[in-house]
Image (tube, grey):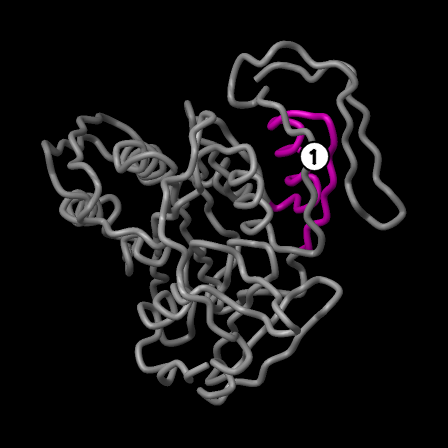
Amino acid sequence: MGLIRGARIAIAATGIVCITVIAAGAEQSILERPVPQFSVYDVRMQQAAADLATQVPFRLGFESAETAQTPFPPTAPWVRVQVRQTNVKAALDALVKADPRYVWRLDGDFINMMPKVAETDQNYYMNARVERFQVSAAPLVTCIKMLLGIPSIAKYNPVMPSLGIAAGGNPAAYPPISLTEQDVTWRHLMNDIARQAGEGWGWVSWQTATPDRPHPQSVVEFIMTYGFAGGRPPQRARPKMIPFRQTMEASGATVTWAGRQGVAQARFQGHLIQVQVGSIAAFLDARAVNLVVPPDLREGRLLVPEDLLLSIRVFEPGLLKPVPKT
């Protein structure tokens, strides 16, 4: 993956990892794309990785180290990173230094970020191997159903609840998939399907673990990472923005606000919903979804895009009451 020439690494007293590249070679690959400035403060790894993918931009395949049983365990680090005049490789290295549970790997135009266990455990769910997979001009939904039905993948109880709907997309509107692969991992197939689904698509995955479920489910969802290889995000109508506190409290939630980080949390019926001002990553328990636009503060109110409610209703039907009129 090449060396970074003239790199300086320092950890400030605040705990923020700072990397400055003094002189780097010419841009030759995704890893050498310039990152003039990137910073995140007290966020989880998926949100940090998604923010970097959005800024550069590049495609992201993210495998969460969290589970639905422990969405934010005390041992999970809050990621603090600040990089200047550097490149993608150095920024990714800074992220995994801030949360050492993760590693990243390059697969063509994809960055795959995964727990370290994926490197050594052949039984890790995304390491499931597929002897042969072939589809011809298949709709995205059909392609995914075929993939999840493969025996080596099916044993991990795979589900894909929204097929990208949570990211603001309509799976039926994307081009048909034609693909022939032999002896590849589930991870590699997800990368290839996302490539064919259109510009900017990536994916996230996580495993659930609850006391009443003897075998964890493996959840996979397409996300829009907003462009790749210098591309531009597709033009979309701006979604309706709704008040976060009013909407959540109308459904019985207790809402807390951390002004310094710009983070709001709603807790109710055993669930946790978290959003952050300026970030497209939102969380429902351990499930992370990318919003069409980030939450915003206006006249002292936190407003979130209406697609957040769609994501919640996909995963937890009946949890929310109708949106109050504003």
- In this picture, is 272 found above or below 178? below
Image quadrant where residue 274 sits: bottom right
Residue 17 position, x and y percent, is 77, 40
* Relative to 135, 292 lies left or right: right
Q: Which residues are magenta?
A: 77-101
152 sits left or right of 224 in the view? left
Residue most extreme to the top: 26
Q: Residues within 10 Å of mark 1 (few under 14, many from 20)?
A: some
Residue shown at 79% from the left, 36% from the top: 18
Q: Secondary structure at mark 1?
A: strand
Residue 317 placement (x, y as % from top left) = 31, 77
Q: Position of residue 206 (x, y in %)?
A: 43, 54
Relative placement, left or right, of 238 versus 156 is right
Q: Position of residue 25 (x, y in %)?
A: 66, 10
Q: Read off the residue under disc 1.
A: 37
Residue 36 covered by magenta stretch: no
Q: Residue at x 52, y 83 (%)?
A: 246
Q: Quadrant of the N terminus?
A: top right
Outermost residue to the right:
13
* In the depicted structure, whether residue 218 falls above or below residue 98: below
Of residues 299 and 292, which is closer to you in this image?
299
**Number of numbered discs:** 1
Q: Nearer the viewer, residue 186 or 246?
A: 246
Between 132 and 262, the residue placed more toward the observer is 262
Q: Is residue 101 above or below residue 286?
A: above
Above-or-below relation of 225 to 239 = above
Q: Tell me the kind of residue under disc 1.
A: Gln
Q: Residue at x 58, y 14 (%)?
A: 27
Check if residue 82 falls in the magenta segment: yes
User: On the picture, is 160 further left or further right than 95?
Assistant: left
